[in-house]
Image (cartoon, grey):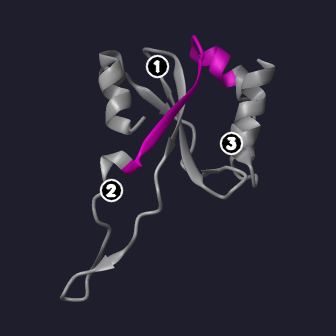
């Protein structure tokens, strides 16, 4: 689902605080993800956002165009009740994020939990 469909599906998501667990997660194919946890719903999700192209305007200034919503996808990985459980389940995540397949590490930790 895209990011708007994700937020539209449950109104609690829009009003909830979110904990960001890193923006540089890579999967085994080198795609980049952001990992977030929605406090009010307990949802841990990956957001995939393609690399933004840098464009030049006629004056030679560079800018990043707006990313179409359809290209920003969300995958809910798990529901984790509270922050203590999240911390226990993903202990060591900052180091794991730098791994070649950090997303695989997250999936493995969730399977073990």
SS for callout 1: loop
- Please tell me the numbered disc located at residue 67: 2
Name the quadrant containing residue 9: top left
Q: Label 1: which residue?
A: 39
SS for callout 2: loop
Name the quadrant containing residue 113: top right
Q: Left or right: 55 with respect to 75?
A: left
Closer to the eye: label 1 or 3: 3
Q: Label 3: which residue?
A: 103
Residue 106 position, x and y percent, is 71, 35
Q: Earlier in the sequence, mark 1 or mark 3?
A: 1
Q: Residue at x 71, y 46 (%)?
A: 102
Residue farthest toward the left in the current orientation of the protein:
58
Magenta span of residues: 71-87
Residue 30 position, x and y percent, is 66, 58
Q: Earlier in the sequence, mark 2 or mark 3?
A: 2
Q: Is residue 67 above or below residue 35?
A: below
SS for callout 3: helix
Residue farthest toward the bottom in the current orientation of the protein:
59
């Amino acid at each position: 689902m895209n990011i708007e469909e994700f937020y539209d599906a449950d109104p609690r998501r829009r009003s909830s605080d979110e904990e960001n667990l890193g923006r540089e997660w890579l999967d085994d194919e080198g795609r980049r993800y952001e990992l977030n946890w929605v406090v009010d719903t307990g949802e841990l999700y990956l957001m995939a956002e393609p690399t933004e192209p840098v464009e030049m305007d006629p004056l030679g200034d560079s800018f990043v165009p707006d990313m179409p919503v359809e290209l920003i996808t969300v995958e809910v990985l798990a529901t984790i009740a509270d922050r203590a459980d999240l911390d226990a389940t993903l202990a060591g995540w900052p180091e794991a994020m730098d791994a070649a397949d950090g997303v695989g590490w997250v999936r493995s930790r969730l399977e073990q939990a």
